Amino acid sequence: MSHRISWKLAWRNFKAHRRLNLPYVFAIALMLALEFVMVSLIDNHYIQTRHQVLPTIMKLGCLIGGILSVIFILYAENFSQKQRKAEMGLYTILGLENKHIRRMLAKERLIKTALVVPIAVLEGYLIGSLMFLLLNRMMNETGVPLMEYPFSLIAAGVVVSLYLGLQVLLRLQTLWQLHHLKPVDWLQASRRGEKEPNGNLMLGILGLGLLILGYVKANQSGNLFNSIPIFFLATLLVIAGTYLIFTSLSIWGLKALKRRPNFYYKKAHFLSLSGMLYRMKANAVSLASIAILSTGVILTLGLTLSLYRNMNQAGDQVLEREYLLEEANLDIPSDAAKELLDQGIQQVTERVMISNGFFHQSLQTIAYLQDGVLHEVPLNAQGKSDVQGFYLLVEDLASYQARTNEHVELAANEILLASNRPDLVLPQEIELANQQYKVKAPAKKMASWNMAVDSLAIVVPEGSDLKQVQASYRMSDLGADHLSENPINYRYYFDAQGDLQVLNLVSGDLLQKGLVLSSRQQMKRDLYSVNGGLLYLGVLVSVILMMGIGLLLYYKQLSEGLSDQINYNIMKRVGLDEGMIKQTIRSQILWIFILPLIAAMVHTLAAWRLVFGTLLTILQVNDQVLIISSVLIIVLAFILVYLVFYLMSSGVYYRLVNQNNSPNNK
C-alpha cells in the first residue's frame, strides 16, 4: 500500500467516524487548552510579582490538571479504539497486512494531532487573554494598571510534549495489539462486554487508608509556612485514595448488594445494578475524576467568593486613618527614627491641616514558645525547621487603643495575646521578656496577619515593656554571626484637610529624608491589585474545573450511550417497555451524579481547616460567618449547575440508546 492510498484511507476513516472523532478532538483540545492556561500562569510576570503563594498554587493546579488530562485522554483513546476493533479485523480479512494497518492508523493519529495541538494552544491563549481582559475591565475603576498575558512558549511546549508523549505510548499499545491479536479477536472485541470486575478489597482498604492519611495531613497542626507543601501531599493522597476507593471498594459494595436477593431481584434494581457492574471499571475512573474536579470547584470558588466579599471590608480597614507616615529605613536606631518622624510631621502640618492623628509604636521579632515561656531563638537555631518559632508583633497599650478605638485596661502584669494559628491553645499565663504576665483576654483587633508564618500578636502595658521585649528577643541579619536588637517601628496616622494634592509634593521631599507617606487610597489599590489577581485565578481555575466536569460527563454519556445501543435494543425486543428503560437510565445516571457529589462534600469538609482556615488567614480573611456563608452559596450554586449537567447528559444518553441503529451499522 502506497503512502497516498494510506492517507486517503486515514482521511476517509476520520470522516466516517466523525461522531467519535470530532468530540474527541474538541474535548482533548479543550482539556489541553486549560492546561496551557495553568502552565502559562506560573511564568506570568503579574502572578510572580503579586504574591509569593500564587506560583506554588498554580504549580499544584498544573499537576492536578495534568493528571486529570492524562486520565481523560487515555479514557477517550481506549473507548475510541474499542469501537474500531471490529473494523480492524475486517481489514485483516480483506487482505490488508499489519504493516498497512499500522501505516493507516499512524496517519489517522497524525490527523488528530494536527487538529488537536494547534486548537489546544490557540484556545488556551484565547481563554487566558479573555480572562485577563475581563479582570482588567473589572479592576478598571480601582486604578490598578493593566495586566499582560503574553504568549508562553513554555506552556505551549509543555502541552505539546504532554500530548505527543501520550500519543507515543498509545501508538506502542496499538502496535502490540496488532502483533498479538488475531483477526477473529478484533471482530469480536467491539461486541464483547467487559468482564465483571472483581472488587479487590485489599486495594479498597489501601485507598481508604490513603484517603484517611490525606485527611489527617490536611488537619494536622503545623505552621503556616509549611501549609502549601502539606496541601500538595494531602491532595495527592486524596486523589490516589479516591481512585482506589471508586475502582475497588465501590465494586466490592455493588457485589455485596448483588448477593442480597431481596434487593437485587427487585425490578427497580436488577437492570441498573447489573449495568453498573458490567462497566464499573470505566465508570469508576470517571466518577473519581468528577469527584476530584467537583471538590476543586467548591474549594476554589469558596476561596474566591470569600476573598471577594472581604475585599471592600478589608479595603476600608487597610489603614486606621487616611494617611500613614513612617520611616523607610528600618535599620536606623529607634531614637533617631522617632526624631526623624517628628520632623516629618512638622513638615506635613506646615502644608495641610491634619486631624485625628496618633503615634503608634510596635516591634517585630521572633521567639519560640515552650511550656508557657517565650524564649529568644539562638543564633544556631534561626532558619532551622525543627525549631517551632513564632513571629512576634508587639505594641504597647496606648498604641493599640489609638489604633482600634477600643478601651482596654491592663495591669502591670497583664497582656493581650492572639495568634493566627487557629489550632493554638493560648496559655492563661506566659513568661515574656523574663517577666510573668497573665493573659487578660484575646486581642480582638490585632495587627495584620497577611503573612505565611505562625505569629503571636501581643499588647504590653507600657512603652518600657516594649523596650524590654526589644532587648530580650534579638535576631540575626542574613549571614550575620551575631544577634542584634530589632528597632522599634514608629508610625504616625492622621487625616488631612485642605489641598491634598500638596501631599503628593511633600511625599517626594519626605522620601529623600527617609520617610514614606502612604494613603489609604493607595493601599486599597495595592490590595485590589493583589486580590484582583487572586480573584482572576479563582475564577479561571473554577472555569477550568467546570469545563473538565462537563467534558467528562458529556464524553462519558456519549461513550456509554454508544456502548449500550445494542444492549437496550435487545431489551426492547424481549419486551421491556419505554418506562422501564427510562427508569433504568435514571437509576444509573442518578448514581453517577450522586456519588461524586457526596465524595466532593466529604473532601471539602476534610480540607476545611487547611483551605478555609490557614490559606484564608494568610489572605487576611478571618470572618468565619462570611466564610461559611460563602461556601454554602457556592455549594448550592454548584448543585444547581450539577443538576443542569445531569438533565443534559441524561437526555443525550437516552437519545443514543433509543436509536434503532448501532454505531457499527453506520
Image (spheres, grey):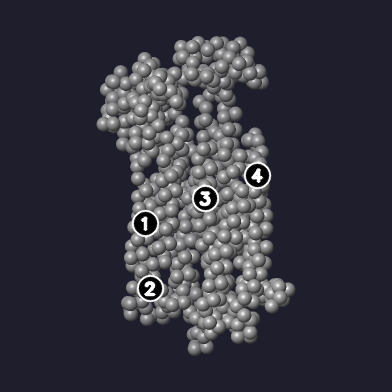
Q: Are marks 3 and 1 in contact (CB under 8 Å)?
A: no
User: What kind of element bears circle 1?
Assistant: helix
Pick whichever of labels 4 and 2 is earlier in the sequence.
4
User: What kind of element bears circle 4?
Assistant: loop
Q: Are marks 4 and 2 in contact (CB under 8 Å)?
A: no
Q: CA distance from mark 3 to mark 4?
A: 18 Å
Residue indicated by mark 2 = 198
- Quarter of the image for the N terminus: give it: bottom right
Q: Are marks 3 and 2 in contact (CB under 8 Å)?
A: no
Pick whichever of labels 3 and 1 is earlier in the sequence.
3
Residue indicated by mark 3 = 61
Left or right of 237, for residue 152: right
Residue indicated by mark 1 = 210
Is 519 drawn above or below residue 22 in the view shown? Answer: above
Query: Residue at (63%, 18%) from the top-left corner?
Result: 508
Q: CA distance from mark 1 to mark 4?
A: 39 Å
Pick whichever of labels 1 and 4 is earlier in the sequence.
4
Pick whichever of labels 1 and 2 is earlier in the sequence.
2
Could you say which quadrant of the image residue 463 lies in? top left
- For badge 4, the amino acid type reads Tyr
Toward the viewer: 420 or 46? 46
